[in-house]
């Protein structure tokens, strides 16, 4: 920990030195620009007043100088607009702003690309005038007057259908030139950003994502270097200075973006501390906004004076960037490789991300162990919440609270922890309401070659069994692997010491094999030149589908023991981090309909993966395209989500969520703006203060407008146990995830759209039927009251008498 702190301090010092050097060069450039612009001061004053007052007329009433008013009144409207554009272009020119497209696009202000009205209004204080006196900033704190351009209020309004959003960018008039050395200016050097409105360095209120905005800075002469039209998005304002030494070419013009199923887009490429951004600066164009943490590998290929970059992402997609200059191509590739390998977790994007949505529910507090335990009140007589691990001293990978048998005290738990691998003593994972059977999970017992024994462990395990009851210990390793582990200090529960338990070895490959299988499977998926037989052979040799079959088979065995036999089960492998959690979570998905809802599935992921200590930081460092990999890396979470999808596609009406929900969870596990999947366990998350410094993924996903996109149109709650088939013909390759760049999802999305329409129409018709039935019943009652009709029973009676 001390070494990490020292490394962080060294890195901060390097950043500080780099920042000072940049600021020194910037001040020198400012002085040079100041001298050059003194000669053009008179023309600059004239055009400033003319442009600002002219554009202000578009934004609202204002007192215009008579000459400008006459100038505008003597022109048709179309020419007025062109005149204003020309004046703004000239203002850009004399201020040294590089030639960029204006806000207006190619259409007039009123339509602005057909679907967005944008009115740009620039005004200065009524008593502000550019003169030689105001060009030099004052050094008096109380009376400091920024250059006239710093007094510009840039505002815009957007109206899309019923939405109306406004921005007001007000520059701070009292900040002195010397403040350029401080953190305020450091943050101003990058583009305005929608996610950083909470920063106090200036008063900003930004428009929604997807709108162009211009920003004015403190010093008049920074406009020539820094003002630009940026697309509002989700990049941190302090990105560039944090990672300045890694960004060799911050912007590159004339870059062509190529993505699957999209037309090529030419635009400006920008590299910030956390994002790779490409914008064509035109409406209705596909753009790029890619987190560096999502980059798995970068391949560069130089040809002639330019080059091509192929960026492969951790979500199994890829993009291509055609860069006109070879030097820029190499610089961008180098920057991406370095920025995607930042080891310091505190420099990752979740610590910089600021949400623009209202947090209706704090995801960090949504699924606490206390809340989850309250759901199983039926077992509260036999089980209890223990806080023996409150300080994480007993088991660093367990949460602060665990559910254990009520008869077992905390001292016994400490002794049991010393007997289990990674101190992962048996804890409750699932309670089956119907059979009252339970499922526990743990690490392997450390019996070693000396057949070490722990009576406290035997007492804890036996405490879950009633009188005359038997249970099953399901080991996710083969018997030979379990015995080999015994030679290294591990092992399994001897039947002589656990006579009430029957041991079953349900073999699943160790996590080390999963990564190689994923690489081979993705290679097969991207191979479009092989014959069908060869392709199937490559897919089979990857063993990826075999892993899925083994996991589902093991989970079905455990579920059968609990549901059919009413027997309790203890699940473990070796460490208890990986295959153990795979099985325990799939079992609950099979048995419990609540886990098949969105909220229930989120709780399952939180309880069985995040709180249970699956080391996401270690396992999800790289994906299938990385050239190098760590020994700890393994796509265990990918296997879990794939297994869920296999069950989902066999029982499409039993799940509240759709396929996109699963894909989004997978993507956020590997790269995210949220802090949910950071770190390896709850202890590390507490040490990093993630709950205070980052936003939870559940806070975002549980918003109604987001949930709407992840609801399954065919959902019909199914309280029954669902038994997935593990036959080869029942398990299929998830092309929607692994072949996103090859298989066009358009037709499938069309089909789901039609299904949604049909279900909505069906729901409407059912509601109409119910309404008509109520009306019919009401009319029948009125008819009976009025004597218009005779009740059926009375009618029969009268006929009989006749």
Image (cartoon, rainbow, N blue to C red):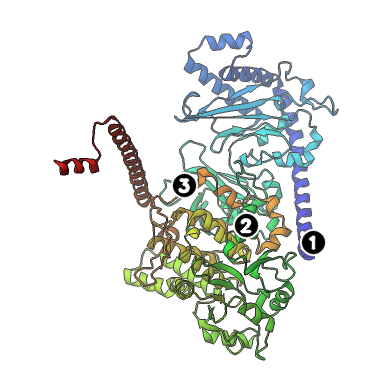
Return the x and y of residue 109 as percentages of the image width and height: 50, 24
**SS at circle 1:** helix
Q: Nearer the viewer, residue 13 or 458?
A: 458
Q: Nearer the viewer, residue 340 or 723?
A: 723
Residue bearing mark 3: 709
Return the x and y of residue 550 as percentages of the image width and height: 46, 75
CA separation in Å, label 2 and label 1: 39 Å
Q: Is residue 430 left or right of residue 764?
A: right
Q: Is residue 240 left or right of residue 434?
A: right
Foreground disc of the pair 3, 1: 3
Foreground disc of the pair 2, 1: 2
User: Which numbered marker is on residue 6?
Assistant: 1
Q: Residue at x 67, y 19 (%)?
A: 43
CA separation in Å, label 3 and label 1: 45 Å
**First in residue order: circle 3 vs circle 1:** 1
| 2 and 3 marks in contact (CB < 8 Å) | no
Q: Is residue 385 left or right of residue 734?
A: right
**SS at circle 3:** helix
Q: Residue at x 73, y 59 (%)?
A: 687
| Quadrant of the rendering where the N terminus is positioned | bottom right
**First in residue order: circle 2 vs circle 3:** 2
Q: Is residue 695 left or right of residue 749?
A: right
Q: Is residue 414 visible?
A: yes
User: Quick check: 788 above or below 504?
Assistant: above
Return the x and y of residue 666 as percentages of the image width and height: 52, 59
**Residue 145, located in which quarter of the rendered image?**
top right
Residue bearing mark 2: 371
| Label 3 Cα crowd, 10 Å radius (few <14 / some 14-19 / many 20+) | few
| Label 1 Cα crowd, 10 Å radius (few <14 / some 14-19 / many 20+) | few
Which residue appears farthest toward the left when viewing the image? 802
């Amino acid at each position: 920990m001390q070494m990490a702190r020292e490394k962080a301090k060294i890195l901060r010092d390097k950043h500080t030195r780099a920042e000072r050097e940049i600021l020194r060069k910037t001040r020198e450039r400012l002085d040079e620009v100041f001298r050059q612009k003194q000669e053009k001061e008179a023309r600059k004053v004239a055009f400033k007043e003319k442009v600002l007052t002219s554009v202000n007329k578009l934004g609202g009433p204002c007192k215009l100088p008579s000459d400008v008013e006459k100038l505008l009144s003597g022109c048709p409207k179309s020419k007025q607009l062109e005149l204003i554009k020309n004046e703004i272009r000239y203002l850009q020119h004399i201020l040294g702003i590089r030639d960029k497209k204006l806000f207006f696009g190619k259409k007039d202000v009123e339509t602005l690309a057909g679907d967005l009205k944008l009115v740009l209004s620039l005004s200065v204080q009524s008593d502000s005038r550019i003169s030689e006196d105001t060009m030099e900033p004052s050094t008096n704190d109380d009376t400091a007057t920024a250059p006239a351009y710093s007094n510009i209020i840039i505002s815009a309004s957007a109206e899309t259908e019923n939405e109306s959003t406004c921005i007001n960018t007000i520059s701070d008039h009292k900040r002195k030139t010397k403040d350029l050395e401080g953190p305020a200016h450091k943050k101003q050097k990058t583009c305005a950003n929608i996610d950083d409105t909470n920063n106090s360095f200036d008063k900003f209120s930004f428009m929604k994502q997807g709108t162009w905005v211009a920003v004015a800075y403190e010093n008049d002469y920074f406009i020539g270097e820094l003002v630009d039209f940026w697309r509002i998005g989700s990049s941190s304002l302090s990105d560039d200075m944090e990672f300045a030494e890694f960004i060799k070419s911050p912007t590159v013009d004339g870059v062509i973006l190529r993505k699957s199923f999209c037309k090529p887009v030419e635009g400006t490429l920008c590299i910030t501390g956390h994002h790779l951004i490409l914008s064509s600066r035109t409406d209705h164009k596909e753009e790029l906004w890619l987190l560096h943490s999502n980059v798995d590998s970068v391949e560069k290929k130089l040809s002639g004076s330019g080059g091509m970059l192929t960026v492969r992402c951790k979500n199994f997609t890829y993009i291509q960037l055609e860069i006109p200059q070879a030097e820029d191509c190499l610089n961008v590739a180098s920057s991406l490789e370095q920025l995607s390998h930042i080891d310091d977790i505190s420099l990752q994007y979740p610590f910089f991300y600021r949400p623009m949505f209202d947090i209706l529910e704090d995801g960090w507090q949504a699924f606490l162990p206390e809340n989850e335990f309250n759901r199983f009140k039926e077992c509260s007589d036999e089980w209890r919440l223990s806080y023996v691990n409150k300080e994480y001293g007993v088991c660093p990978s367990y949460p602060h609270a665990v559910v254990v048998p009520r008869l077992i005290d905390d001292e016994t738990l400490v002794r049991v922890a010393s007997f289990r691998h990674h101190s992962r003593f048996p804890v409750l994972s699932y309670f089956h309401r119907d059979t009252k059977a339970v499922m526990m999970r743990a690490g392997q017992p450390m019996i070693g070659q000396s057949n070490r024994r722990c009576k406290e462990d035997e007492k804890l395990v036996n405490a879950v069994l009633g009188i005359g009851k038997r249970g099953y210990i399901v080991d996710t390793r083969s018997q030979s692997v379990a015995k080999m582990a015994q030679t290294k200090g591990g092992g399994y529960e001897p039947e002589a010491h656990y006579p009430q338990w029957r041991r079953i070895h349900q073999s699943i490959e160790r996590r080390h094999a999963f990564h190689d299988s994923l690489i081979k499977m993705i290679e097969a998926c991207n191979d479009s030149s092989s014959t069908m037989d060869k392709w199937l052979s490559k897919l089979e040799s990857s063993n990826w589908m075999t892993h899925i079959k083994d996991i589902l088979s093991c989970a079905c065995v455990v579920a059968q023991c609990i549901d059919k036999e009413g027997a309790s089960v203890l699940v473990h492998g070796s460490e208890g981090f990986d295959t153990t959690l795979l099985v325990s979570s799939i079992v609950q998905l099979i048995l419990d309909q609540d886990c098949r809802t969105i909220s229930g599935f989120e709780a399952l992921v939180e309880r069985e993966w995040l709180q249970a200590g699956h080391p996401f930081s270690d396992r999800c460092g790289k994906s299938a395209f990385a050239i190098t990999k760590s020994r700890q890396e393994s796509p265990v979470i990918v296997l879990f989500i794939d297994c869920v999808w296999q069950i989902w596609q066999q029982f499409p009406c039993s799940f509240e969520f759709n396929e996109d929900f699963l894909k989004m969870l997978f993507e956020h596990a590997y790269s995210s703006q949220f802090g949910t999947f950071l770190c390896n366990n709850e202890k590390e998350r507490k040490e990093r203060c993630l709950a205070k410094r980052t936003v939870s993924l559940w806070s975002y996903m549980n918003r109604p407008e987001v949930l709407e996109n992840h609801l399954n149109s065919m959902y019909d709650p199914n309280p029954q146990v669902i038994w997935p088939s593990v036959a080869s013909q029942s398990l299929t390759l998830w092309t929607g995830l692994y072949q996103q760049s090859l298989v066009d999802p358009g037709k499938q999305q069309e089909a789901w759209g039609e299904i949604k329409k049909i279900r909505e129409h069906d729901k409407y018709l059912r509601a109409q039927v119910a309404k008509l039935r109520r009306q019919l019943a009401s009319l029948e009652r009125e008819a009976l009251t009025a004597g218009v009709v005779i009740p059926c029973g009375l009618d029969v009676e009268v006929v009989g008498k006749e």
